[in-house]
Image (spheres, rainbow, N blue to C red):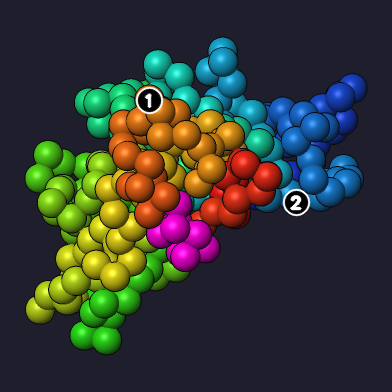
Amino acid sequence: MSELQSGQVVELTVLEEQGSKWILTDGHSEIPLNSSDIQVPITLGERVKVFLYADRRGNLQATTAIPEILQGDYGWARVIKVTKEGAFVDIGSSREVLVKEEDLPPLQSVWPEVGDHLFLTLRTDRNGDLFGRLATEEKVIEMYEEASDEMHNKNIKARPYRLLPVGSFLLGIEEPFRIFVHNTEMQAEPRLGQDVDVRIIAVKDDGTLNGSLLPRKHERLGEDAEAVFAYLQSVGGKMPFGDKSSPEEITEMFHMSKGAFKRALGTLMKAGKIKQVEGWTEIL
């Protein structure tokens, strides 16, 4: 029988109970299973499917919470914490794993935030510690789904998995379409793993896609409306300025004329993005 290792999913036999933990065995090694890591009751002699991991001392431990992503498998893992070490993600087990700083983009401004999702697999280092490894371009090319010509001009939900100076590579969330967005087709570079809406502007012969993060021309609000809406978002969605505000207030706050400000408000109201109530403007 091969040696038990961190990162494996194995079936072990319940050997005995010791206080707040159970001892499992494969007939050669004994592995502790904390009661807090048991999802359903177990009994002596029962065969139990568990995931093995190394604790801080390097000793093997077991949990019945099997990760959704295992070694050799790839999937989206939600970011639950970001530190200078990197991004910690939830793999569906009782153990969070780290995507190390050196695996993330050089610019921290495009690092993932809590709630973003990274496309990765599970790995272990020489000490048995678990960590997440982002999917390589080669792996994505192996597994992406080819798109049909019908995808042209459609909008799909996607997440960036690779960021380059020339643009961003994304994977579709529901279906793993491979999408490239050139930096001229975005207002700002997205974060790694950020949910974005991508408009498909080209379907290539190999089934990959070119996309845009810019709105269609008829959907664009204009610079003044965008500026007013961005300000609203930055102050919590509500501001004490409206079409009754004085020209001096408008110029001081928004650096635009009263007429331009009123046109911007009209554009936003027509687009169903704001409302005005008793001198206040609020995001809908």
Verify whether residue 194 appears in magenta: no
> Most prominent secondary structure in the magenta stretch?
helix
Q: Residue at x 73, y 49 (%)?
A: 48
Read off the magenta span.
264-272
**Can you name the residue that lies furthest to the top here?**
57
In terms of secondary structure, where does tag 1 sit? helix
Name the residue tied to disc 2.
47
Residue 268 lies left or right of residue 68; in this view the side is left
**Can you name the residue that lies furthest to the bottom here?**
150
Residue 26 % position (x, y): 65, 41
Residue 27 lies left or right of residue 189; in this view the side is right
Give the mark toward the camera: 1 or 2.
Answer: 1
Name the residue tied to disc 1.
252
Q: Tag count in the figure?
A: 2
Mark positioned earlier in the residue sequence (1 or 2): 2
Residue 92 % position (x, y): 60, 46
Residue 266 % position (x, y): 44, 58
